[in-house]
Amino acid sequence: MALPAQADESSDIAPAPTAESNKYETAASLTGKSEATLKQLEETGDILVAETGHVVEVDPAFDSERASFSTFSAPTAAASVPGSPEGGSNPGAPLTIFLDFDGATFENQGWNEVQAESPLTFASSSYSSAAADVWAAVVEDYAPFNVNVTTTDPGADALYKTSADDNEYGVHVVITDSYDDVLSEAAGTSGLAFIGGTGSSYLSGALVFTEGMGFDLSTPADVIADSIAFTSSHEAGHNFGLDHDGHADDDSGYYYPSEGLWGPIMGAPYGVPVSQWSNGDYAGATTTEDDLSIIADGSAAASEFLWFEYQDGTIYTSTSICYDQSANGPDPQNPQPGDEFFAVNEAGTECTDEQLVLVFHYKDRADFASDQVGNNTDSATALSLAGDVFDADGVIIERDDVDVYELNVADGEFTAKLDVAEVGANLNASILLTDADGNVIAEDEGNPTRDSAAAASGLGAEITATDLTAGVYYLTVDGVGFGDPSQATATDAGGFSDYGSLGHYALTGTAVEPQIVPVTITAPADGSEFDGGDIDVTGTGTIGEVVEVTVGDETVSVTVGEDGTWATTVAGNQYGDTTITATQAIDDSEASVTVTSTAVVEAPVVNDPKDSDVADGEFVVTGTGVPGATVTVTVLTPAGETYTLETTVGADGTWSVTVQKLEEGEYVVSAKQSVNGVTSEGSDVETVVITDEGTGEDDGEDDGEDTLPDTGFDLGFAGFGLMALLLLGGGALVLNRRFTTES
């Protein structure tokens, strides 16, 4: 671009982009709420609209009475969440939730703009002894998502999304003893977070204020952990784009039930023992936003321009910039990645050649976790018995998710037990036992009761079948609701649906271990013959186990019957040998037989050359055969030497080879084809006379191609699946006579 040198030539100088003059207009475009609604929410203290238009969700401080309601109940047997606080719950996940108890400093970020001060340093938390329980509860809340929850600083690269293609980013939850001494807006709150700030370097910092939680020297440790954990999940939820859940009969803006079992994470569930994500399916809900879908809404990914910087990282503060004003130039009021802008001089009258750095921030959401256990009997995960005991750990990740397990048992008693997470359980579990035909043998589901405002019991499930017959059975684990949320009041939710009944579980049980019988193949016999086509295969194995029967790349599955036998049909090779392998997973046993087809491979058909054909320059042999077969063309030279060329029959059954640059004389050509190691007899042969030696140049040396040695001419072919080019001089080809040979 041509930069103007004088002020009166400054058509390329424009005002630098600034925030919208109406911050509510910007906020409306970012949140989807009307300007009037945003102003009303700000007036009531529910939100704060920054000058840039970004919205901060404001969560009020707890009073000591509310705080005293909260504690973690610890069942005698419970599921453990994976990992550790320091190592993380899911190392390697693309998204990180960093629970930071060690303090943080923000500079040139959103909180600095709110406070009009930079840098801002938040102190560490004096409640780091609660970190393990806080971590475990947050892991349980975010179990449906592919995230790594950790108390170890993962570094900026794992928290900040730096481009649209950067898939590693996160949420920085700062748990601090600082309060309005650092951030004035913190006064009277328990937490603050920018809405939709996940991955953003500018909106980072979901703030959790311990001073706003009503703690004192007499506050029990588990109350502290519960309060910090709930607030951490809640503030992180704002970063994922979530609003508050309220009740129509409570003008606080938060659903704060003080009775019953349940409250929503994005409400204020301090007075109930179970909190879950919600879709507002309780009576009186002020929002029906789908928490889980919003957290995993990839379409919410976006970028926003922040400011210009000099090359040394200093923020550019001039009110003017230089740019290319041609039709291909950038829009100075809507800069995009890759645009070029330049600084003006100190007077703001001329453009310089100093290119500016455009600074953007990027926001995104999470992905759902992958389902590790099959959802039906066809994809069931097999459980093995060791000393008549089985166990498995799992997680229910969404409303329609069920985990199905398969067990093979002998006659006798069967028991199974489901335990939910030890800390902050979200799952109300059910378990179902069915036989191979789908008949229900036993079932149970969580029947939770409110033991106190601090604890609930009965979220797990347990079954017993006293006289089970030997065979294969299926255990289905699910998350279920309880009560009737359509009867919810401001003080009692009445129950909950299965929407948020998700999370970790531990499955344990006992059964009589079956007798393991290694798999065998009883028919066909090894080394026997068949006439090509399908093969009936039979064998024996462990009752109820699945046997996989494999031929080549094809596998069929069959279940061993109650008599200990199995049978299936496989497609054998039409020609040659077929190896059949049977495997049984329960003991890794394997059996294999090889049978031979009696079908004869017919000789390929040679279509060209034909009687009296005359060719000039090359000799082409074409024909038909078995698709996929290897055709070998044999050429007998006038000197009595034999050379072969190979090609593959195409899917349409045709093949061809080209022979070039031959000396004068009589050549005999024939073809055979091979399929699966079986070779046909030779085809009808052609005797071809070359009446004029080819004129192409050759040094007579063997250069690694298919050549006739030291004659100055080469022999080659072009065919399906393989091609080699041969030099050929122009010569006349005359078909002399046809006869049959086996050579």
Image: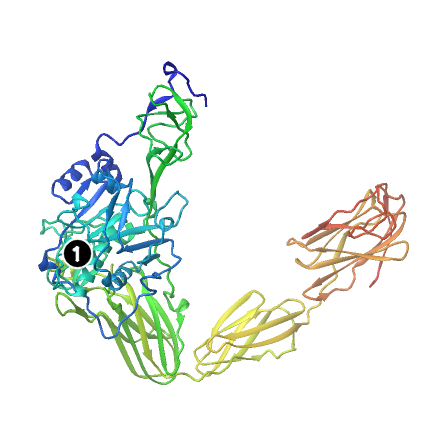
Residue assigned mark 1? 282
Q: Position of residue 720 (x, y in %)?
A: 68, 52
User: Is 143 placed above or below 663 here?
Assistant: below
Q: Residue at x 23, y 51 (%)?
A: 123
Residue 31 shows up from this direction: no
Q: Position of residue 149 (x, y in %)?
A: 31, 58
Residue 261: name its quadrant: bottom left
Residue 238 shows up from this direction: yes
Q: Position of residue 519 (x, y in %)?
A: 52, 79
Which residue occupies the extreme top position in the image? Answer: 8
Amino acid type at circle 1 is: Tyr
Q: Quadrant of the C terminus?
A: bottom right
- Give the crowd class for mark 1: few <14, some 14-19, many >=20 residues within 10 Å: many
Determine whether, in the image, residue 18 is placed left or right of residue 604: left
Q: Residue at x 28, y 30 (%)?
A: 18
Task: Name the element at disc 1.
Answer: loop
Q: Position of residue 237 (x, y in %)?
A: 25, 52
User: Is 590 placed above or below 453 here?
Assistant: below
Q: Nearer the viewer, residue 318 or 471?
A: 318
Determine whether, in the image, residue 187 is placed left or right of residue 233: left
Q: Residue at x 44, y 85 (%)?
A: 515
Q: Nearer the viewer, residue 1 or 24?
A: 1
Determine whether, in the image, residue 392 is placed left or right of residue 174: right
Q: Nearer the viewer, residue 148 or 26?
A: 148
Coloration mode: rainbow
Residue 598: name its quadrant: bottom right
Residue 686: name its quadrant: bottom right
User: Is 27 placed above or below 559 here?
Assistant: above
User: Is 722 placed above or below 45 here?
Assistant: below
